[in-house]
Image (cartoon, grey):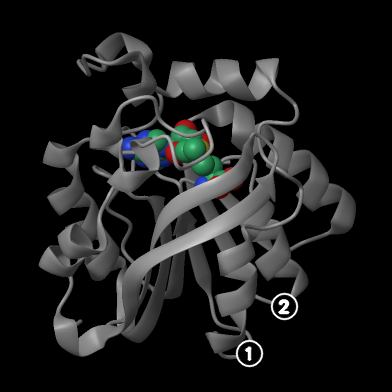
Amino acid sequence: MTSSAATADATSDPAPRESSRPAFWDERYRAYPDLFSAAPNAIVAAEADRLPDGAEVLEVAAGEGRNARFLAERGHPVTALDFAPAGLDALQQTAAEENLPITRVCADILTWTPDRRWDAIVVTFLQLLPEERPRLFDRLRHLLRPGGLLIGVFFRPDHHTDAYADVGPPVADRMLSPAEIRQYLPAAGLHRCGPVDRHLDEGRIAGLCALAVVVYEAVDA
Ligand SMILES: C[S@@+](CC[C@H](N)C(=O)[O-])C[C@H]1O[C@@H](n2cnc3c(N)ncnc32)[C@H](O)[C@@H]1O
């Protein structure tokens, strides 16, 4: 597995919240084999037809790589990045068994600086803090080739009300509104950026979810 200086190292991570540390996610992946479904996120599956044949995809915060596997099965070479090794270890097993074209990278998306770009980026349910999100979107834009596509699915803050399933981050500041996403991406490249209410059945993400969905084409890279 590719690694970088910015990889999981809880001892040097000054993050104040446990859930900002790779170890938090490693524990969850080890404790809950059903944390996420084997199937891809429903919105990623629906949007995948937008990707040109053979497009090289980076999945950011891939976890156990359910989206990476789905895209690789469709013929896309996929780079699956996460800062928690446990999810990537699980992905290695299934990807090797199925001989899928997936490269795993254990790194923090906020500090990772590869010397290449991708045709598409997929990110689902990455839960960063408000002060981290400008950097996240800056990195995502930088990592896309001109004309490349970003497909993103996040919980939006409405999810924290009683109308929705009791799943996802316990604190709403890890959720994103479509309005916030619009602050980070040039309007000219937005194919879609809005709220979606959807029943999901994706492991522990089960029930009615308030989502923010973005599909962005890199217009300025
Ligand atoms: C809620 S899980 C979603 C996993 C996957 N996207 C899915 O939908 O199945 C969030 C993932 O984000 C990863 N993550 C959180 N912060 C990260 C960071 N700064 N860099 C890379 N991965 C991160 C965690 O390790 C975890 O695997």
Q: Which sits earlier in the primary sequence, circle 1 or circle 2? A: 1
Instruction: Where is residue 205? Give x, y as percent.
Output: 60, 40
Instruction: Where is residue 146? Give x, y as percent.
Output: 29, 87
- Binning the other alpha carbons within 10 Å of mark 1 as few (below 14), some (14 to 19) or many (20 upward) gives few
Residue beneath label 2, please?
A: 75
Task: Give the residue drawn at x 87%, y 56%.
Answer: 98
| 209 vs 43, nearest the viewer | 209
Instruction: Where is residue 33? Give x, y as percent.
Output: 75, 26
Q: Is residue 96 above or below residue 99?
A: above
Residue beneath label 1, please?
A: 53
Quarter of the rendering occupied by the C terminus: bottom left
Query: What amino acid type is highlighted by mark number 2?
Result: Gly
Furthest toward the front, the residue is: 163
Q: Is residue 105 visible?
A: no
Q: Are marks 1 and 2 in contact (CB under 8 Å)?
A: yes
Furthest toward the top, the residue is: 11
